[in-house]
Every structure is written in C-alpha cells, then in structure tokens.
Amino acid sequence: MNIKKCLDYQKQFFTDFAQAWQKRSDLDLYQMIDTTAKSLRLEVSEVPAYILAYDKEAQNELEAYLQKGLTHWLRQDIPFFEIDARGVIMFGDWYHRRQFGRLDVWNRQMIQNTPNQQQILPELERYASDSETYLEDRLQRLHDELFTDVKDLEHDLERAQTAAETAQTEVHSRISRERPQPQNGTGRLKSLFGFGDEPEEQPEPVAPVTPAPSKPVNTTQIMDLKNRLRTAKSDAEVEFDDQKRQIEVEVAVIRYEYQAIMNHYSSIEQFENALAHISESYLAALSEKGADQDA
C-alpha cells in the first residue's frame, strides 16, 4: 500500500468511526476497535487511545458511553450482578456480599484481579459438588488444622505416661524377684515324726537385698506436658469458635450466590461458560438489535 492509499484508508477509517459515534452505534464502534487491534497488533484496550490521539478526556467519554450499554445488557442477562459507574461488580444485594470483579469495557469481560475474587468460582464449584456437607467439611478441616498441636501433645503425654508406668512396673517386678524366700517347714515335720532330739540345721543368714537402682519416673515432664496440653486446647477452642463464626457467614454468602445462579442457569458450568463468552454474546445481541431496527 503506497502513501496515498494508506492516507486514504486512515481518512476513511476515521470518517467511519466519526459516523459510528454520531449514530451512537455501539456495534460499529466495537467492531472498528476490534478490527484496528487485529490489524495493528495492539491490545484492544490500547486502540481507543490510538484512535482518539491519546486524548484522555475523549477516551473516558467513549468508555463511559460504551459502559452504559454493556452494563444495561449485563443487568438483563445476569441480574444478580450490580455494576457501578466505576465498573465495580458486586455479587448480589445481600449483607456481606462480595466483589466479583471489575468490568473491562473495551474487551467486554469481567476481570478478577484479587485472590478473593479469583476464589469465588472455585468455591461455588466445590459447594455445588456437595452442598449438604460443605459447611461441615470446612469446619472439620479448620478443626484439624487448629488442633494439630493439641494432638501432638496428647501423643507426647501418652508416650510419657506409658514410659512411666512401664518403669514403675519394672521396679516392682525386680523387687519381687530379689526378695528373700521364706524357709520350708522341715523342722516341724521332724518334730512330728520323733526326730526332735536331733539337732536341726540352721539356714545360713541371708543378707538383705537392696534393689538395683532404676531409671526414675520423670513426673515433672508429665506435669509440664499436661499444662501445655491444657493451654493448647484452650487456645485452639477459642480460635476455632472465632473462625467458625466467620466460616458460617462465608458459607451463607456462598449459598446465596449459588441460589442466585441456579435461578437463572442450569449449572455452575453454564454460568462460567456465559461469563467466558460475554464479548461474543454482547456483540451478537447488538447485531440482533440493529437488525430489528433496520427491519
């Protein structure tokens, strides 16, 4: 393309864009933005600045205009979303509602930038897979996490008590084995059978047995473990009660979100598919609206 053709093309493009703006044709404006992005290999969001000579005020005016039409359509297609003038998308109108994301007017998409926003759909998927036990499962995971140290201390205490009992049993057993045994009754039998006049052999004296020293039972360690276990249990129970209330609120919000979706879609997957194709669906709706007006 020579210079003249290039300039003629640009002149025609800006003429067409000006006419589209004059007619307030959202479809034509979007199509020309998309076409320019492809031909110049630009991001769609960069094209308005290029077309409007990088005038920020003009870009804001065009974005505000296009946002009105897109927001109006979204409110009909996804009525449980509330979108303000800044493009902030709130999920529902209930207490503790969550911010779902932000509206990207140029790309006709809903953008989720924060971790809290990005976990909304995965949470809804998990809730949909087993809504009956979702709250119970989350509370059980929380309990297992918070009581990990408690379980470890319980095992340590059990091992210490078992070791103490084993050591004590060994001491008693050793003492029993080493204690002198009483003499049998041979002298009495001799007396009964008339052998009393014979001198009786006296047993040699047995020295008293001193038990061998054994490993002492560490009662101090056991008491320390009991005190630590008592404190750990108390702290874990307080933390569990606090987080339990928070999780119950979170699950209630997820339940509201799930019910709102299921009132308009057959499944979470269908809802996610609708979100993924907002751009195509909106342009199709604009095209259909234009065809109806021309008829």
Image (cartoon, rainbow, N blue to C red):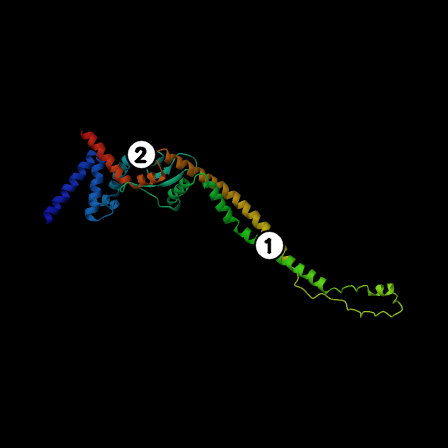
Above/below status of 137 relative to 152? above
Image side of residue 103 versus residue 48, left or right: right
Which of the two marks, 2 or 1, is nearer to us in this view?
1
Q: Amino acid at mark 1?
A: Glu
Above/below status of 238 relative to 222? above
Residue 267 place in picture, x, y as percent: 36, 38
Checking the image for residue 158, the label placed there is 1
Q: Quadrant of residue 111?
A: top left
Residue plotted at (39% across, 42% down): 125
Q: Amino acid at mark 2?
A: Asp
Residue 287 place in picture, x, y as percent: 22, 35
Checking the image for residue 77, the label placed there is 2
Image side of residue 294 versus residue 215, left or right: left
Above/below status of 206 relative to 258? below
Depth check: give the residue in front, 66 or 129.
129
Q: Quadrant of residue 56?
A: top left
